[in-house]
Image (spheres, rainbow, N blue to C red):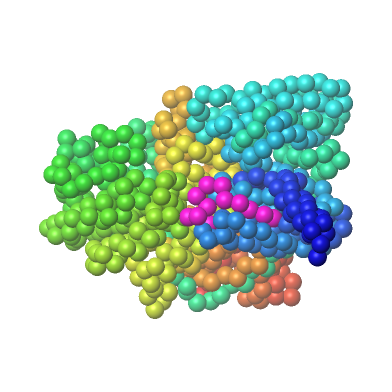
Amino acid sequence: MNKRYLKLLQLYLATLLACSQLAYASPLPWSNLRAAQLFIFPATATTLQIDWRAAWLADANQDRFFVLDAQGQLLDEQTLDAGNANGSHTTSLTGQGPYQVVIPGYSFRNFRLAAPQSAILLQPSKVHFSLTAEQRNSELYFQTKAGEQAILGGKYQDKGISAYRLRRLSDGKQLQLPLSQTPQRGFQFDRLTLPLSQQKEIWQLTLNGTGKASFWLDGTANLFAQSPGDLRDVSFATGQVSLTLGTHASGKTPKLGFYDFNASQLPRAMLQSLAALKPRFLGAYSFYDALNRDPFRQDDNMQTLQRMGMEDSVTLLAGTGMRGAQRGVLDTREDVKRGLTAWLNMRIRLQNGGLHYISFADEPNRIYPDYASYAQYFRKMAQYVRSYPGAYEAGVRIAAPASANFVNTPFSDGAAQRKGIDWARQLLADNPGLVDAIAWHEWDHAKDLLATRWYRYSVQQAAQLVGSHPDGSALLPLYIDQTNIGSGNSTSPYQQDTFYAGLWWTSVVINSAMDGKLSGLAWFLTVDDDNHHKGIVGFDNGQFTLRPVARAMAFINRFWKPITLPLQNSAFEVDAMAMTDNRSISILAVNKATRMQHITLPGKSLCANTSLSLTILTVEGETSGPFVCRQGQLSFTVPPQSLFALHWNNAP
């Protein structure tokens, strides 16, 4: 081979490599997605390609994404574990759509999506950021219908988009939404009301700058495209759901409840409203330094809560004299032990027949320097509690580790070494006989109704850790003693002040409870405080109000029963579980989708049962739903985003 030919070949190969690298580096039609839903309308059969790259803590945390067909059935689901920080996946799209891609976020990875010969619409999450803009002044388009009062919402994210510019294509009218860059809590954001129009309008949205982008629409369809020609209405076909009920008990349902609060601050009517929710499980804090000042300070409050119906509890030992996370970093010095002693004496005084677990820190995997530091403290405190006279007889038990998340990690440095499940496994091995229950806080970082099945997975992983009794129940009780749609003050009014919270809570309850492994589940918190606007009771301008989630809690409790029954469910968008008290049976379910669902159940005996009733709860209120029995099959239809329950008495 002569030198000239060799040089030409080398030049050709170098050019080919450069072109391939350039093609790979060029942005996909939708890239750097962190929390979004996308609707895909293929013009012909095509291939959906989804790529992902590590964004933040991907080496320690799982992500999932879902692909749904036009009927809402799960076409594809991918679980990306800690060893799959980067990768690619393809799915064949053979129908007309709309297909739906769900990327729950904040994800720990950046996602890129392409589907050739397809129109793609983005539905961004509200308040939480959805994507990162790499190019300056990126442009998107949206449309409003005649007479719609559209509102553009936006929130500044650290080093992100600073403003949004709008231009109406019909006449060139321009508007701007500057974003406040002072620190804001999760429930604070900026809004811009668009002018009304008596015709359909198309608007161009320009993202000012680069970085994280948080934007959305109220009052109109929250949908964005990369070209005006891709804009269209999204309509949903009715989903088809098949439920099949089993007959043998599969476990026990958990006790449901909420978090400790100062009963003296609430009006009597509000206390009665909370009692009507029938709480059976309490999460609580006890502050050692406050107990040292007044050992009886919790007595009246705990007695009020017990009268409400609280039976079991998980208490976190902490300190009020510390700030932020540091209030939970305790050691075995004498003043901490004195506070713990006061708590033990309180539990002995107020025996109610329940089990009262003490956990010696609040999310230790997030705030302690390392496992060894916490384990040394835990062992000494656990031995002290176990040997305290009268404590065990009063129902005092020990829960660990009360971690921040369980399978996934807290959002902190060294996350891979801070998994709650790993700390729990090590505590069990290092302290035989001292751990009576496993507890953890499951903060829903995904913030997506279709991703709540994570709760079932988390409980299953905990059950595998502790093992099972012959009847399938967990060998050690399992408690999610704090949960909400987000941690800290990251939750938004869209999630807390709307019916969304009721849909979310019902879905979380069903996914956590359906396998009969969990012993207790508590909503955090009960009453708003300065940093958390996510209580069951909202507090604003001196007024207490019940948030919408209370309606869902009351609905659930009407149909809640102690024993779980197996229930096969063909749907992805509908969660359902079956329960019995041997006298009657309930099927509790939630339609999380924005489509109607047609439900069918086989069973001649069910159709013949005159006590059978269907109850439906939507944002508009509660109704008795009609159903049809034909050829031994029960069928009915439920509206979008609704709770529903079938209930019937067993034959005598």
Residue 627 painted magenta: no
Q: Position of residue 560 (x, y in %)?
A: 48, 59
Q: Is residue 195 left or right of residue 364?
A: right
Relative image position of residue 636 (x, y in whole percent): 70, 61
Residue placed most toward the observer, 533 or 263: 533
Task: Classify residue 439 by image quadrant.
Answer: bottom left
Q: Is residue 408 left or right of residue 354?
A: right
Residue 56 belongs to the span the image colors magenta: yes
* Magenta region: 50-62
Which quarter of the figure is the N terminus placed in? Answer: bottom right
**Which residue is depicted at the point 39% across and 68% down?**
465
Q: Nearer the viewer, residue 413 or 617?
A: 413
Q: Nearer the viewer, residue 174 or 187?
A: 174
Residue 145: horizontal and vertical position, in percent? 82, 33
97 with respect to 571 (left or right)? right
> Is residue 562 depicted above or below 643 in this figure?
below
